[in-house]
Amino acid sequence: GAPDWERTELFLLFGTAEDHDSNPIKMGLGRLKERGAKVVAINPIRTGYNAVADEWVGITPGTDGLFILALVHELLRAGRIDLDYLCRWTNAPVLLDADGLFARDADGKELVRDRESGAVFPFDTPGIKPALHGTVDGLTPVFEGLAQRYLAPEHSPDAVAERCGVPVETTRRIAAELAQAAFEKSFEVKTPWTDFRGERHESFPGRPVAMHAMRGISAHSNGFQTTRALHMLQLLLGTVEAPGGFRFKPPYPKPVSAHPKPHAKVTPGKPLDGPHLGYPRGPEDLLLREDGSAARIDKAYSWDAPLAAHGMMHMVISNAHAGDPYPIDTLFLYMANMAWNSSMGTSRVIEMLTDTDADGSYKIPRIIYADAYSSEMVAFADLVFPDTTYLERHDCISLLDRPISEPDLAADAIRWPVVEPDRDVRGFQSALLDLGARLGLPGMTAEDGSPLYSDYADYITRHLRRADVGPLAGFRGDGTADGRGAPNPDQIERYKANGGFWTAEVPADGLYFKQANASYQAWAAEMGFYVSDAPEPYLFQLYAEPLRKFQRAAEGLGPNQPPDHLRARVKEAMDPLPIWYPPFEETAIDLDAYPLHAITQRPAAMYHAWGSQNAWLRQIHGENPLYIPTQLWTDLGFERGDWAWVISPHGRIKVPAAPMGALNGKTVWTWNAIGKRSGAWALDPEAPEARRGFLLNHLIHELLPAKGDGHRWANSDPVTGQAAWYDLRVRIERAESAGPQSLPDTGRQQSPVPSAPSRHTFGERSE
Amino acid sequence: MTSLPERTEKSLGLVIDLDTCVGCHACVVSCKEWNSAAYGAPLGDLDPYGAAPEGAFLNRVHTYEVDPGDQAPRVVHFPRSCLHCADAPCVTVCPTGASWKRAEDGIVLVNEDDCMGCGLCAWACPYGARELDPIENVMKKCTLCVDRIDNPHLPEEDRVPACVRACPAGARHFGDLADPSSAISQLSEARGGVALLPEQGTAPVNRYLPPRPKSDQIDVLGPLLTQREEEPGGFFGWLDRTLERL
Amino acid sequence: MHPAPSLIVFTTLSGAGFGLMIWLGLAPMDGEIWVAAVFSLIALGLASGGLLASLAHLGRPERAWKALSQWRSSWLSREGTLAILTVGLFSLYAVLWVASGRPAPIIGGLASAAAFATVVSTAMIYASLKSIPRWHSPWTPAVFVAAALAGGALLAGQVLAALVLTAGLALIQVAAWHWGDGAFARAGSTRSTATGLTGGGDVRQLEPPHTGSNYLLREMVHVVGRRHSRRLRVIALILVAGLPLTFGLLFTVGHGLGALLVVSHLTGVVILRWLFFAEAEHVVGLYYGAR
Ligand SMILES: Nc1nc2c(c(=O)[nH]1)N[C@H]1C(S)=C(S)[C@@H](COP(=O)(O)OP(=O)(O)OC[C@H]3O[C@@H](n4cnc5c(=O)[nH]c(N)nc54)[C@H](O)[C@@H]3O)O[C@H]1N2
Ligand SMILES: Nc1nc2c(c(=O)[nH]1)N[C@H]1C(S)=C(S)[C@@H](COP(=O)(O)OP(=O)(O)OC[C@H]3O[C@@H](n4cnc5c(=O)[nH]c(N)nc54)[C@H](O)[C@@H]3O)O[C@H]1N2
Ligand code: SF4
Ligand code: SF4
Ligand code: SF4
Ligand code: SF4
Ligand code: SF4
Ligand SMILES: [Mo]
């Protein structure tokens, strides 16, 4: 989703440096500035977007959940919540039984109690007035437990101020500002519309408060629940999908029920039994083998990370090396520099990739890798697929994956080759189709054994997910069909003629409250956004029932239960209402020895590791210092030009240092992925990236420090498996000498690619 | 040639909003891109993938930290390019006549065919707006994208400098600062646009809009956070009464 | 500022050469014709050697001739034009002198005046730059003129004048330093005025616009240690004036000693010029966090 940049009056930005839609965010911030709306940045570091914010809350990493719940506490106490919204659009009134599961009717519809009649009805019954508290027949509305929990004094601003590093007055003032913007600056968008209950409304009520959060929240081991807390805060204010609030981008919103479940049933000679990623609804949907161990090499959808909807890339090499849950014979990677910036514990991962068994054979026998550049990972591959760059091939940015939509319109896009490759490379998607055809894989091979698709462009055009639904939604059929339609051989040309993208506008009476809006739902179903091909309206989930199902299993109920050592953790982390708990790593170490948080930020001008392949950008970010809070800098006797030792429970690195004032006093940070291995990327082995650039990744471990219980716990969110990159704790020391080389020195790699020319001009002289 | 015009009809220039610039360097890169294939020689780079890469840029973005002491320090991103000064010292020092200021719109340019690469104009500029190209050895500077702003071959929306067009945040504005009724003059007026290094006497045309003062003033003790628990029936009592009114 | 060798050589040699021309034009020595020839050649050699060195500082030396065009506005153009005029006039003077055996005082006077104007223009190239506060003062032409006259006198064997002038140069230089050390502060340019962030609070560069070097940093942001520069100042004064004065007052200066003193003096001037560049701070440094 995205904030309603045109209408919001107060914008809270949590833990975001860049994000994926970085240009839209910059444009949006510019609009807010132009309109004079207030921007509050909650971030330990004040740079970039956060630098231009009107107010900066320099929160201590990992404590946003506490801060958000304190805002919830204040708003509840003051009754500054949108009761009408909660009754209509959320599961606040849905009745819970004694097990904490939803009371449902025979059709499986959640029940609510009507305040007037006292009777229970399915939630979508028109005209009822749902109750928000009171237990009748053992059934209690969700809201009652919610209010009781967050009204408790443990959630007051006073109780959390110290841990968050946010003064009580600041939290209270921001709560007041939220209330003021949401309820005293509210307005109406005068468009009549009809909701899924069939009730007609004369207008959309505006709630001009918007929030956006990114990895500053999610890359902590409590990130999932913090994100839930943020969703709850917005629902209580009635801003989600309201004008001025947070708005979903089509094909979202979608209920969990409209998503696939994950699949892992491998049958030789057959495709997988379904999509490999998805949303488990309960313990029965986990991907476990007979013996209860994980079915996937990354252990996603196991009890380690039941809702790992993105998989757990950062665990693959470590698991494969340990042979846990099983050994593998081939590691096949694509576009992921796992020997370097996308691994936790880079030096250890380098060892794992080259480690051998007693008999001298590699622990990971074969590594196949597709990369477009001479990255660190390339050096470890037995077989390399040299890919084209994105300027030399077709790509598809599909509604089925991560589209480029905006709240007002659905959109997707392509890339097409704009330069001819000048070396022996092939677009990897086309290479995959070729491989598939050679292996005779179903879906890639025709009846007669010939390749089904000539190349990726052909696949984008002709592949069908369901009848008439393919990777690209635009210009289907005869070229006029949006969303659905037969494959159009001319589709790619139509995209090119349109600048590479396609858009379809959401109907005017469907622009807001999409989750409940009959017009939007009909349009979305017609466009093919739902597998059911039917409208999928739903209630926003303050209380997440699937979580409760996992929690019950941990409590010893049901056939599928977590192993004993995980019970307590699953029970705590799978709370159906948002909670906060301290990030795992800090509970496992001596905080006096590692008093500081260490985090990274993406620089706006660099894309991860491969930004350095641009001769101009590497002049902007050729090396990276560790930024240290000014007070600490002075206390430790640092001076300009000094270097620092940064020490975590898992390692030590020596790096250039610099002071910074606009920084949480317990936090050090650096830019992400600037450091390179000497010789990599066809850069000069003495390149500044290799000499003075560095990665924090050397200090991070994919496992938490051993607790002595015989188990090693993943350094990830226990619900989603999201890597806890930002849970890292360190201490720093002034290095006795500056330079000359950041440490550890991982040695020099040979470049299979020749070095670049010594001068460079682009373009030509014009007269 | 290197005498400055008495006056210019227009004073075209930029207004840069320091309250909005997020420091993304998009303007830096788009400037280099446009000016590598447009006016004059391309902007070169030495040792582009080597140990000490170094090239010419016409626009660079610094990041400063301002510590007022009594409040949280601020971070300000600061793009720096030619300010097209009315009293441009870079022009008058030029011995060859390569540097000049256009009488019609005040744009300061270098005629690269006449430039002997002495660097004196770069010395004369207090703002560091001129860089000698490391490959062509002639002086490069911001042209205010003369080859865009009135280029009839470009679509209307592209007839602004490349950096202005690229800036996603809308922190860069282009226009005639001599015309008090122009949008850019009015923006500068309204936001208290400042001239850099005024004591240098260069009379720059470009203006910088300072970060806006922040006000946190809101009455938290007022009705916004009235405590419902203190009302009859506590929180749920308030809830029932409010639901009735819905 | 970057103390570029080409510029140090240029200002030192051409200063000495034109200084010698001033003396030869106004007060030609008596004696044999070959003496006149040799001294004229020395003057011309120094001046043109310096000018040639200055070409090394150009990115496009083949276009140097274009620099003669803007004498109405540009001191560099004036300097170039005057230098050529001076070399021309002085050559004429020297040829006539050698040919006729007698110096022509009117042409000599003109050549002297032109040489003097050239030295002033050289100095004005620097003195006119407001962006470099240390240079932007009458002390800059004063030092350049004093150095040219003193060096010229030494070369011309005008012992008494040389002693007075080297002493004068030392005094002027000390005064110039004294003035120059506070010039940047007095000019009023700060990181606040440079950025317009004048609302209060120290403005500190958190991140430079590029992590490597660039033209501006190499050319204009040269940092020299204070102790280092103090030491060099003393050494320069000793070489420029101390030794010539001591030996000049204690001994009768013959050709041998004279040559040694010239070497000492010119070495001192080289150090002075190194300091002239290295100690000069350009206001652009403020953007990069200098001061
Ligand atoms: N230019 C550029 N853009 C990119 C990328 C890139 O490499 N370069 N990468 C893309 C990718 S893959 C991703 S995943 C996204 C990531 O987009 P972002 O999430 O914006 O990326 P990060 O740079 O990790 O920023 C995280 C922010 O969270 C802050 N933070 C850390 N811990 C906490 C905390 O506990 N609380 C709060 N409130 N803040 C915290 C950090 O200071 C930082 O500002 O960006 C995408 N966009
Ligand atoms: N310390 C720390 N570590 C982090 C993070 C952090 O915030 N802090 N962020 C994490 C996150 S969110 C992410 S997404 C990862 C990103 O980490 P990676 O995905 O490893 O990073 P990239 O640099 O994007 O590079 C991936 C590889 O793709 C290659 N590549 C680029 N273009 C192409 C192409 O067209 N085809 C092919 N085949 N290859 C190509 C590049 O050369 C590179 O080797 O990093 C993670 N690591
Ligand atoms: S990297 Fe490309 S897709 Fe991402 S924000 Fe920038 S321009 Fe858009
Ligand atoms: S900013 Fe510098 S280059 Fe531009 S006109 Fe002014 S003095 Fe000249
Ligand atoms: S570098 Fe070129 S433009 Fe600049 S003063 Fe010298 S000749 Fe003129
Ligand atoms: S106006 Fe043109 S030349 Fe000047 S900084 Fe902007 S893009 Fe560069
Ligand atoms: S493009 Fe705009 S926001 Fe980005 S650095 Fe330049 S001026 Fe600032
Ligand atoms: Mo990512």
Image (cartoon, rainbow, N blue to C red):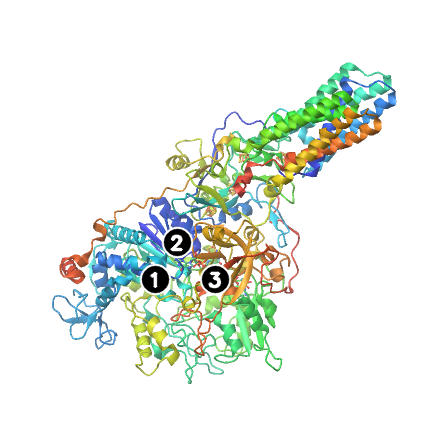
Query: Which kind of residue does numbered mark 3 sit on?
Result: Val
As measured in the structure, the alpha-carbon distance from the residue carrying label 3 to the one carrying label 2 is 19 Å
| Location of mark 2 (residue) | A58
Q: Secondary structure at mark 3?
A: strand
Query: Which kind of residue does numbered mark 1 sit on?
Result: Gly
Please report whichever mark, 3 or 2, sits nearer to the chain's N-terminal start. Answer: 2
As measured in the structure, the alpha-carbon distance from the residue carrying label 2 to the one carrying label 1 is 14 Å
Question: What percent of the width, then of the height, locates residue B62?
Answer: 50, 45
Query: Which kind of residue does numbered mark 2 sit on?
Result: Gly
Q: Is residue A395 visible?
A: yes
Please report whichever mark, 1 or 3, sits nearer to the chain's N-terminal start. Answer: 1
- Could you say which is closer to the camera, residue B152 or residue A296? A296
Question: What percent of the width, then of the height, locates residue A17?
Answer: 44, 55
Relative to C149, A148 lies left or right: left
| Location of mark 1 (residue) | A65
- CA neighbours of label 3 inside 10 A, class few (<14), some (14 to 19), many (20+): many
As measured in the structure, the alpha-carbon distance from the residue carrying label 1 to the one carrying label 3 is 22 Å
Q: Chain of mark 3?
A: A
| Location of mark 3 (residue) | A730
Given this view, does label 3 or label 2 mark the residue nearer the observer?
3
On whether ligand 2 comes within 8 Å of the CB at mark 3, the answer is no
Q: Is residue C64 visible?
A: no
Question: What percent of the width, then of the height, locates residue C270?
Answer: 71, 34
Given this view, does label 1 or label 3 mark the residue nearer the observer?
3
- B178 relative to B230, above or below: above
Relative to B166, A85 lies left or right: left
Q: Chain of mark 1?
A: A
- A41 relative to C138, above or below: below
